[in-house]
Amino acid sequence: TCVICKDPCILCFLILCSTCINIHLKMSWTDAQRYCREQFHDLATIDNLEDLERLQASRKGSDYDIDSAWIGLYDDRTRWQWSYGNQDFKTGQDYDNWAGPEPNNVGAKQNCTMLMPQTGGWADKSCSDLAGPVCINGALDLYFVFALKMTWYKARKYCASHHTELAIVRDATENSKIYALMNSNAWIGLHRNPWSHWSDGSRTTYLNWETGLVGHHASPITKLYHHVDQKMSWTDAQRYCREQFHDLATIDNLEDLERLQASRRGSDYDIDTAWIGLYDDRTRWQWSYGNQDYKMGQDYDNWRQTEPNNRAGVENCTMIKINSGLWLDVPCNGEFNAVCINGGLDLYIINTAV
Ligand SMILES: *[C@@H]1O[C@H](CO)[C@@H](O)[C@H](O)[C@H]1NC(C)=O
Ligand SMILES: *[C@@H]1O[C@H](CO)[C@@H](O)[C@H](O)[C@H]1NC(C)=O
């Protein structure tokens, strides 16, 4: 049995729980989810070490001694995503080419997508099966199909080591481009990512599994930042980063920011300003890498006070002042240095259960 302890503060969405009363309840995860959604906002989300510590601190002094409680993390086996930018795959909406009864998740362990050589159709397969990688360049217009067979995870690393990512396939034309190049089973970047989201729909960026308790523990590998000391417009910087590395820099949290700053130190070059990948194409703010949505006011940011202000209606690209780490929206045709990221972004380490 699992327990919702008497203090729902430690279970429900942390921010909204400051005034809750103590109750003592045990229930299933689904009931706990319903309860939290009715009474507060949702089951707890823990996005970083500070959240965890706050959760623990809010528990201290409680006279209740049961130590275990539900949080909002769950294994949703229906969620697919592209390894490229961790983009969600919208089932029934995005292009797919599943062959016949696929995806059928045989034995509940088929988490990765293979292109079959006979038809170019897709099948879900165990990620530890062997196939050749299909990589895509940062500009998403060139495929590289390799004959060497390897697991899906190795395939992903293999692409990253060539500054690219496992292929994303967005329509039938792209699918047939790959099909024309392959003569054996091939991995693309579509995979089920069972622990990728919290109950409130937000993505997991931080996991703190007790060692050995789960078989599938994905933790992002460190992003590597590259500083380009050459002034250019944002669009040229994007092209440059996509050609030479993987894309313009993405900054998802404070650690990323600090690493970006640290990677700059020791450089004898004294220009402090550079492009990062965040921009507004006038329909939405997004990161250049993977065209990931950026939710203003919700996702991590480090805007300078009063930014982004879209001054004179012409500011839709983001420049970072590296020493202070502050972000500013500026016109995209300004000329700045650039910070790129390597293709190793979002590789996963898999810990197998003991
Ligand atoms: C696939 O996902 C399941 C959970 O849905 C997990 O138990 C299994 O370890 C995963 N397999 C691989 C190869 O990642
Ligand atoms: C910035 O906005 C202008 C329109 O105001 C648009 O034409 C341009 O494409 C945008 N730049 C980028 C990089 O999205």
Image: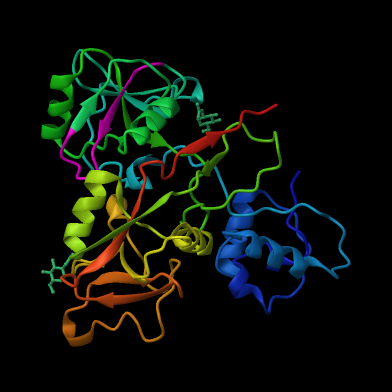
Residue shown at the point (49%, 39%) measured from the top left: 194
Residue 35 lies left or right of residue 89; in this view the side is right
| Residue 23 appears in the rendering | no
Q: Where is residue 120 in the image (x, y as percent from the top left)?
A: 20, 21
- The front one of 29 and 245 is 245
Give percent across and percent down for residue 13.
Answer: 59, 66
Q: Can residue 121 be seen in this view?
A: yes
Please report the residue visible at 71 percent of the width from the left and 64 percent of the height from the top.
53
- Residue closest to the eye, 179 or 328: 328
Quarter holding the C terminus?
A: top right
Q: Is residue 109 above or below residue 93?
A: above
Task: Give the answer, above or below, for where 150 lies relative to 210.
Answer: above
**Left or right side of 152 for 248:** left
Task: Find residue 277 and report its horizontal and vertical position in percent.
Answer: 30, 60
- At horizontal 19% and vertical 70% (from top left) the residue drawn is 332
Whether the magenta-drawn stretch holds residue 54 is answered as no
Answer with the quarter of the image where residue 84 lies. Answer: top left
Magenta stretch: includes residue 137: yes
| Stretch in magenta | 130-142
Residue 354 located left or right of residue 183: right
What residue appears at the point 43 percent right and 17 percent down from the top-left corner? 129
> Residue pushed farthest front?
268
Against 326, is 85 above or below? above
Q: x%, y% of residue 168?
A: 26, 37
The image quadrant in which ligand 2 is located: bottom left
Q: In which quarter of the image is residue 350?
A: top right
The image quadrant where one finds the N terminus is top right
- Residue 353, relative to residue 217: is it above or below? above
